[in-house]
Image (tube, rainbow, N blue to C red):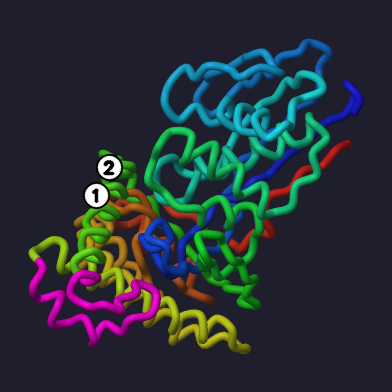
Amino acid sequence: MSNQDSIEIIAPGRVCLFGEHSDYLGLPVIPAAIDLCILLRGHPISDRRISVRYLDTDKSDSFDIGEQTHYRHNRDYLRSAFNVMARQGFKPAQGFEAEITGKIPIAAGLSSSSALTVASILLAAYLSGADLDESEVARFAYQAEVAEFNESGGMQDHLASAYGGVIHLRFTNGSPDVTRLPAKLEGIVIGDSLESKDDTVGDLAFIRETVEQGYEGLSNALDDFSPRRTPVEKVTGSLDELEDPIRTMTKTTLLNRDLTRQALEVLNKQPLDYEKIGQLLNEHHRLLRDGLDRSTEKIESMIRAARDAGALGCKINGSGGGGTMMALAPNKEKEVAEAIREVGGKTYRIHIHRGANISVQ
C-alpha cells in the first residue's frame, strides 16, 4: 500500500423485489442491487487518522485509527465500521483521506445507509490488509449498522449490496444462505415521493414486535407451528382468535412468505415472464399497503400513474410510510417516468448492479 495509491470504492443500494418486511423476521427475501451507489474516493496518508468529507451534506469527520473511537451521534456508520473491524482484529496500517458522495436518495427505502456501511467496511478491510468475501463484508456491515446501535433491521440490505445482482436470501439456523438468481431484470423505474419518513427504525420495531406476538399466539395454539413452513390455511382459525393489528400483520407476513416462494420459481425461469412478475409485484404491494399499512396517498398516486402509463407492476420500497416506489416497465421506462413526475415524484431509471467493489490505481 502506497500513499500514491488512488482508491475507489463503489457500494450499490438495493430494491427488495419480494419479501419486504420479512428478513428481520427470519423469512426469505429476494433483493436486487441497483446502480444508485455510494462512491468513496481517496488515498492513504502518513497520519494515523481517517479523514472524510461528505460532499452531498458538506460535513466532515476525522478520527484516530488503532483504538476504538467514540460515536458523535447514533448511526455513526463510518466510525462503527472501523470499530467492528478492529474488534475482529483488522486494524488499519495507515490513515486515509477520502471524499464520499452518493446517488441513493437518503431514507427512501433504497438502503443508502447500508451501502455507506458496506463501503466503510471495504475501506477498513483494505487499510488493514484483510481479504473479505461477500458474506464477510455483509456480516461486518450488518454488525456496524444494525447490531452496534441495537436496531431492528435484517441483513438483506448488506448482502444485496455486497453480492450484487438478484439474490434469494433465506436463513438456516440463523445464518444467511444466499443464492444468486439468473434473472436479469430490465425496465425498473424508481419513483421518489419526496415524503420524509418519520421513524423508520420505530416502524420496523413495531412490525417485528407485533408479528412476533402473533407467532407466539400461533405457537401456543398449534404444537407444530413454524413461521417458515406452516400453511396459512392451517392457522386461519387460530389467527381469528388474535386481536388486531397482531392478526392482520401476522397473516400478511405469512402471505408475503408464500408470495416470495412463487416469485422465486418465476425468477429462476428463462426467459423471464415479465407479466407474471408484474402481477406478483402488484400483489406484494397490496399486502404491504392493506396488511402492514405501509403506503401513503402520494405513493398510491404515483403507482396509479405508473400503471396507467404501462407499468406491469409496482410496489412501495423499504420500510414504507413515504420514500420510494418501484415500477417494472420494460420498454415503457420513459413513459412511466414521465407519468410519475407529472404527479410530483422524482424518478430514476435504474439497472441491476454487479455489487460492491474496490479498485486501486
Left or right: where 95 falls relative to 242: right
Residue holding disc 2 = 202
Can residue 24 be seen? yes
Residue 194 percent location from the top left of the image: 33, 44
Left or right: where 296 falls relative to 84: left
Q: Quadrant of residue 260?
A: bottom left
Question: At x 88% / y 21%, what residue is drawn?
Answer: 3
Residue 22 percent location from the top left of the image: 38, 63
Residue holding disc 1 = 206
Report helix, strand or loop for mark 2.
helix
Residue kind at label 2, given as amino acid type: Gly
Q: Which residues are magenta?
A: 218-242
Can residue 304 be seen? no
**Above or below, 303 relative to 55:** below
Query: As rendered, which of 101 and 30 lies closer to the eye?
Result: 30
Query: As rendered, which of 11 and 125 lies closer to the eye?
Result: 125
Residue 231 highlighted magenta (yes or no):
yes
Taking the view exactly as shown, the residue that stands out farthest to the front is 223
Question: At x 53% / y 19%, what residue is drawn?
Answer: 59
Residue 110 percent location from the top left of the image: 46, 51
